């Protein structure tokens, strides 16, 4: 894992305001794709709405390289930091 990616993980925890759910899902998906690669396993079903949303967000990145996902994650965190 790149040092920049690791720093972005720390920076996102220190944001002054919590991002919206859509941004949080994007951060989650980019993090998972950047660390684990393509989504595995079955999509959570039934009434696990949060698990389903997370799975879908991650699955949307299927095929993207881990390095590219890490770059996008860092760029998104930098944008959030700039907003304050």
Image (cartoon, rainbow, N blue to C red):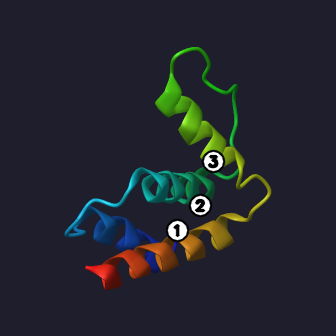
The structure residue drawn at horizontal position 36% and vertical position 74%, both measured from the top left corner, is 7
Q: Which mark is residue 58?
A: 3
The residue positioned farthest toward the right in the image shown? 63
Please tell me whether mark 1 or mark 3 is closer to you in this view: 3
The structure residue drawn at horizontal position 69% and vertical position 29%, both measured from the top left corner, is 41
Q: Earlier in the sequence, mark 2 or mark 1?
A: 1
Q: Which mark is residue 46?
A: none
Find disc 2 in the rendering and name its residue: 34
Check whether the beta carbons of the residues at disc 2 and disc 3 lie within 8 A of each other.
no
Check whether the beta carbons of the residues at disc 2 and disc 1 lie within 8 A of each other.
yes
Separation of disc 1 and disc 3 at Cα?
A: 19 Å
Separation of disc 2 and disc 3 at Cα?
A: 10 Å
Find disc 1 in the rendering and name its residue: 1
Q: Is residue 73 above or below residue 4?
A: above
Q: Earlier in the sequence, mark 2 or mark 3?
A: 2
Instruction: Please provide percent x and percent y for residue 46.
Output: 58, 14
**Tag 2 secondary structure:** helix
Instruction: Please provide percent x and percent y for residue 8.
Output: 39, 72
The structure residue drawn at horizontal position 37% and vertical position 75%, both measured from the top left corner, is 80
- Image side of residue 17 versus residue 6, left or right: left
The residue positioned farthest toward the top in the image shown? 46
Which image quarter is the C terminus in?
bottom left
């Amino acid at each position: 894992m790149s040092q920049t990616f690791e720093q972005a993980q720390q920076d996102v925890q220190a944001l002054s305001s919590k991002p919206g759910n859509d941004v949080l899902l994007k951060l989650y998906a980019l993090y998972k794709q950047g660390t684990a690669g393509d989504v595995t396993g079955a999509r959570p079903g039934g009434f696990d709405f949060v698990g389903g949303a997370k799975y879908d967000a991650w699955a949307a990145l299927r095929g993207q390289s881990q390095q590219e996902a890490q770059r996008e994650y860092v760029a998104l965190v930098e944008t959030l930091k700039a907003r304050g």
